[in-house]
């Protein structure tokens, strides 16, 4: 993954300053923007965007009209693209919402719609949402009919409850239903990028209000486009992993705990060295009188630093079984250290989860890396 310095780099900010000096020389000298390139230090990418945005505001005396004039002039240059756009959107959002008037507010939203095809304005939209939720959502509704897929995507992505790298919008977290009409308008969009945003947005909602998410998905599936089932599967992925019954049914899984006999998991080794691999198999049989469709996951109960275990669900397989039919599933699970996960030696456990139902736990020991593998 690119680092902050590779995204909003000093060179990128110098290019932004040069572009503004060419296209809007009468608005400002843009010295603060140029100087901000030397003060990025160890800032994260979002902190860099806001810091350079503050420099832009300083160069325009925080005046929305001056900044808007400069941005529109810069937009005539196709070179205004990429990560230099993010600080511009941040500056526009702060200036437009800080003015206090409806006209600058609406003009700022229009500028975001113009800037978003050059990179994205999704992060800056949060400033507008927090300043005036209803006015901003009304603009997002208009964007859902835009001929530009980047603008349509902004309507969904910018209003996501849990947008990565972005500020929270507490009013949406308290009532995520306010954004569902946007998703209703966009879930059959012709653009893959827009539909992916809709799915991720509904997945965010599912973490806050599962019934709201499943009711929207059920509504879409009553008159689906060819792309709708795949969108719903992606949107409900968190609920499916959690074994939420309505979500499982909506994506096509059916069969209860008593319909399936599970033998396993059977481990090839019960002592794994740090950095090693856990291997296991399991046998599933449909013991009911009807066909079943099974989401087969496995749960690893990791030992934490405090001596307690915490479960994490991993996808394993999908199986459709006729009455009496059996299947075997196998998996290897690596304990190679990752920057995103720290492993601790001690007693761990693994179990199968089938259509949300968890079966027998089987323990194993994760030992030091230097320890020889035993059985």
Image (tube, rainbow, N blue to C red):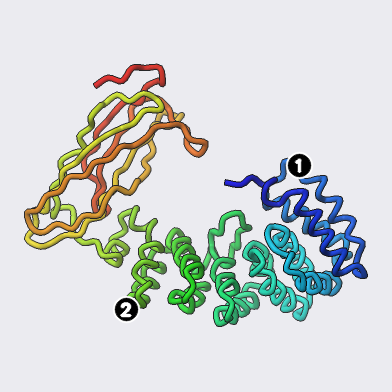
> Which secondary structure lies at badge 2?
loop
Left or right for 69, reference 201: right
Left or right for 132, reference 333: right
Q: Residues within 10 Å of mark 2 (few under 14, many from 20)?
A: few
Position of the C terminus by quadrant? top left
Q: Which residue carries the number 2 mark?
A: 222
Q: Is residue 295 above or below residue 38?
A: below
- Res 272 → quadrant: top left
Q: Position of residue 62 (x, y in %)?
A: 85, 65
Circle 1/circle 2 CB separation < 8 Å: no
Mark found first going from the N terminus, 1 or 2:
1
Q: Position of residue 373 (x, y in %)?
A: 31, 20
Q: Nearer the viewer, residue 9 or 313?
A: 9
Q: Nearer the viewer, residue 42 or 12?
A: 12
Q: Residue furthest front?
A: 78
How far apart are labels 1 and 2 at the CA level?
A: 52 Å
Q: Is residue 175 above or below residue 365?
A: below
Q: Which residue carries the number 1 mark?
A: 41
Q: Residue at x 55, y 79 (%)?
A: 144
> How many labels were placed on the picture?
2
Q: Is residue 86 above or below residue 302?
A: below
Left or right for 213, reference 141: left
Q: Is residue 212 above or below residue 245?
A: below
Residue 219 appears in the rendering: no
């Amino acid at each position: 993954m690119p680092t902050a310095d590779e995204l909003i780099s000093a060179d990128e900010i110098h290019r932004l300053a040069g572009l503004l000096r060419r296209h809007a020389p009468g608005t400002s000298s843009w010295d603060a923007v140029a100087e901000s390139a030397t003060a990025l230090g160890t800032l994260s990418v979002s902190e860099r965007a806001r810091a350079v945005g503050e420099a832009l505001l300083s160069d325009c005396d925080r005046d929305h009209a001056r900044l808007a004039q400069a941005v529109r002039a810069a937009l005539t240059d196709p070179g205004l693209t990429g990560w230099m756009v993010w600080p511009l959107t941040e500056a526009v959002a702060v200036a437009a919402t800080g003015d206090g008037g409806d006209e600058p507010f609406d003009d700022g939203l229009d500028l975001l719609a113009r800037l978003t095809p050059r990179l994205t304005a999704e992060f800056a939209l949060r400033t507008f949402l927090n300043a005036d939720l209803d006015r901003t959502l009304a603009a997002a509704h208009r964007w859902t009919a835009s001929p530009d897929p980047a603008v349509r995507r902004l309507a969904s992505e910018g209003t996501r409850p849990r947008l990565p790298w972005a500020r929270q919008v507490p009013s949406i977290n308290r009532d995520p239903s306010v954004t569902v009409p946007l998703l209703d308008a966009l879930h059959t969009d012709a653009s893959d990028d827009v539909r992916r945003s809709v799915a991720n947005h509904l997945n965010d909602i599912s973490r806050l209000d599962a019934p709201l998410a499943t009711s929207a998905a059920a509504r879409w599936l009553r008159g689906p486009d060819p792309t709708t089932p795949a969108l719903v599967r992606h949107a409900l992925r968190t609920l499916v992993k959690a074994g939420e019954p309505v979500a499982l049914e909506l994506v096509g899984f059916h069969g209860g705990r008593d319909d399936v006999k599970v033998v396993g998991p059977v481990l090839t080794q019960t002592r794994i060295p740090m950095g090693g691999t856990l291997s296991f198999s399991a046998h599933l049989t449909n013991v009911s009188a009807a066909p079943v469709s099974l989401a087969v996951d496995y749960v690893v109960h990791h030992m934490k630093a405090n001596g307690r275990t915490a479960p994490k669900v991993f996808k394993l397989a999908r199986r459709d079984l006729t009455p009496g039919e059996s299947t075997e599933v196998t998996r290897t699970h690596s304990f190679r250290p990752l920057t995103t996960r720290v492993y601790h030696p001690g007693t761990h456990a693994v179990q199968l989860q089938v259509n949300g139902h968890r079966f027998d736990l089987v323990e194993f020991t994760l030992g030091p890396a230097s320890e020889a593998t035993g059985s």
